[in-house]
Image (tube, rainbow, N blue to C red):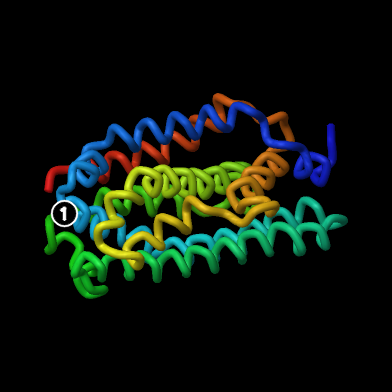
Amino acid sequence: MSSLIERFNTPLPSWIYEIKKEVRQKVMRSRLILDCREGNDEAKKILMIRYWPFVDEFSEIIRRHQLRISAREFLKYKSLSLFLLDTVSKILADTREDEKDHRSLWIDTSLALSLNESDLYLRENYYGAPEPEVYKIIEKVDESVSIFGNKTPSSIVLLRLVAVEIVAEAISHELLVVFNDFGENAIKLFKAHIYHKENVMSYEELVFRMAFAFDHKMPEKHKTNKVIQEITDLFIEAGELPI
């Protein structure tokens, strides 16, 4: 069996692209995204309000996972504590900071649509935002890592975090052009999910590598796809609820 560090340094399998393509196709076909692309400004406002509860929580979800994954994996890999501290903790900490920035950009995009932060918090009282459905996403992505035992391993939790990033990137590709009509501030959010620094490994790839390293097995397409599509389907379901 390869070591944790060897597994982390292994290039990602080529079938990751196929999984991302399936997510992109689901997002393209979803009713809310189609309504936005057809120029329905009300649908654009609904999108910003509907997913806000998750966006508002996500950086704290990552913080909680950072603490529990560190505790779980330090117990298993005491001899690799320096690697875990330098790699795992830093990646999740940086990802959390990114999501804080994305939360601010979400508010900027909303303001460009004449929605202030108070409007976002109205949730079900403003355009019928389906709070219970969005909380299904929060509950699943925030499911706590099992420090002892294998009830919820680090690898599954990390794949769910990757799934959120993949969905956000897919939505951004679909909506960058249609939100451009509202000005530069409206599209900074989508650009942040699409464009990455050159010659620097993306957080998506780093988290994928962490997930596969903690799994102890060769990455399996079916298992990986199941986790990612489950999160994708929750986002689609929340977006397609009636207004």
Q: Residue at position x 20%, y 55% from top?
A: 46
Q: State left or right for residue 239 relative to residue 243.
A: right
Q: Residue at position x 12%, y 48% from top?
A: 243
Q: Is residue 141 above or below residue 93?
A: above
Q: Residue at position x 47%, y 69% from top?
A: 100
Q: State left or right for residue 219 relative to residue 52.
A: right
Circle 1: residue type: Asp
Q: State left or right for residue 234 relative to residue 39.
A: right
Q: Nearer the viewer, residue 212 or 48?
A: 48
Check disc 1 and report the residue beneath it: 41
Farthest residue in the top direction?
A: 222
Q: Nearer the viewer, residue 226 or 15?
A: 15
Element at label 1:
helix
Q: Is residue 105 above or below residue 219?
A: below
In the rendering, at what x and y percent does residue 187 appear?
36, 60
Q: Quadrant of the N terminus?
A: top right
Q: Residues within 10 Å of mark 1 (few under 14, many from 20)?
A: some
Q: Nearer the viewer, residue 76 or 49?
A: 49
In the rendering, at what x and y percent does residue 26 appear?
35, 32
Q: Nearer the viewer, residue 201 or 10?
A: 201
Total labels: the figure holds 1
In the rendering, at what x and y percent does residue 127 appear?
12, 57
Q: Is residue 85 above or below residue 193?
A: below
Q: Residue at position x 47%, y 53% from top?
A: 193
